[in-house]
Image (spheres, rainbow, N blue to C red):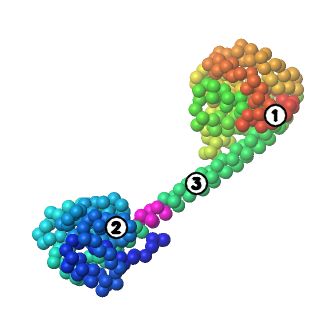
Amino acid sequence: MSTPPVRKEVLIVEDDAKVRSALREVFLSDGYQCRVASNGREGLESFERERPPLTLTDIKMPVMDGLDFLRRARTLDSDAAVIVITGVGDIKTAIESLKCGAYDFITKPVNVEAVLIAAERALERRQLLMERREYHAMLERRVGEATRDLAAALNELEDTYRATLEALGSALDTRDVGTHAHSRRVVGYSLTLARTHGLPDSQFRDIEHGVLLHDIGKIGIPDGILLKPGPLSSDEWKIMRTHPDLGRRLVERIPFLRGAVPIVYHHHERWDGTGYPLGLRGEMIPLGARIFAVADAFDAMTFDRPYSVAISFDAARKEIARCAGTHFDPNVVENFLKIPLELLETIRNGSVEWSQAAPKGPAAREH
Ligand SMILES: [Fe+2]
């Protein structure tokens, strides 16, 4: 605590010279430094200059009375410890002075012992109030610092999560579609489409996680099926189609990633209800999954795959428009078609914040 120790200094504001002098003697004899003033105005000038920790003031004085002095002194220094001296029986004034912030009042004729006790008590109270305020300020500073540290730690944690998920997404891409940048591009298309569709930024994190992890369930699909060069048998398809559910079960166990479940679980649903795993129809399909479906199809069409070469952006957009209402949500498609071609190019080339470098590479068939 850095509150300075109490200064034994007192300002005596009293128009009666005898009383003033007597009070001065009392305080001097008790080790106080004393300043005196003969009315409120003089007292206020001295107060403003010296800021004494303690002031004794008479009430009835010429020029400026004690209550006026008290109010002004408290305005200058809200910690000012002021004791008022009132006449016997003047309880009304004493109460008024306490309302104005006086620490205490003593009555005339002044008793030496009483005035010194009141002075000591007033200084102690002032000190306590100052220490308490400083303590609160210190607590607020510490809370502020701790909040900033926590925010920085959370950011760092978030970055670490993000990097981990991106690495995982890349690993999944590399095993499956043969290029580590597929997920990054689809994140870029999906977030751009989500924004165009009017989704709030607060949902972007879940969408990004969902896109990066959409095929995580393929970890549970045997290589013999996942990487089979020829067409799959119907039994193999059955196994392949379990990957959204496998993914859901993996992801929903992690609270931080739970928001990704709708995309992971429903990314193969179709608007007309012919998709899987549940065959959901229309708006029963979570919006994130409907957005992902368009973004993913666009990337699949515009990037070379082992059995087909990439088609132009324009041709891909036409194909997506053709599938509106069957494969895709028509409203999502409508908004997708509003995204300028140049922006899609930029995302493809990895020049926007959520998209990393997108080296060209082969992609496997769409599952
Ligand atoms: Fe999939």
Q: Element at badge 2?
A: helix
Say which amino acid is labelled 1: Ala
User: Which label lies toward us, 1 or 3?
Assistant: 3
Question: Which of the two residues, 37 or 234, is positioned nearer the viewer here?
Answer: 37
Quarter occupied by residue 150 = bottom right
Highlighted magenta segment, given as a residue range: 132-139
Q: State the separation of the CA atoms marked 1 and 2.
A: 73 Å
User: Which label lies toward us, 1 or 2?
Assistant: 2
Say which amino acid is labelled 3: Arg
- Dot 1 corresponds to which residue? 358
Question: Which of the two residues, 126 or 272, is positioned nearer the viewer here?
Answer: 126
For label 1, being within 8 Å of ligand 1 is answered no
Residue 249 seen in the current view: no
Report if the CB atoms under discs 3 and 2 are less than 8 Å apart: no
x and y percentages locating residue 199 in the rendered image? 59, 29
Residue 173 vertical position relative to residue 33 in the rendered view, above or below: above
- Dot 3 corresponds to which residue? 148
x and y percentages locating residue 30 in the rendered image? 31, 84
* Sequence-earlier tag: 1 or 3: 3
Say which amino acid is labelled 2: Phe
Q: Is residue 142 magenta?
A: no
Residue shown at 16%/75% (left/top)?
108
Residue shown at 32%/69% (left/top)?
81
Residue at the extreme bottom of the image, as rendered: 29
For label 3, being within 8 Å of ligand 1 is answered no
Counting other residues with Cα less than 10 Å from the Cα at mark 1, is it few (<14), some (14-19), or many (20 or more)?
Answer: some
* Sequence-earlier tag: 3 or 2: 2
Lateral position of residue 22 relative to residue 365, left or right? left
- Dot 2 corresponds to which residue? 47
Question: Which of the two residues, 228 or 106, is positioned nearer the viewer here?
Answer: 106
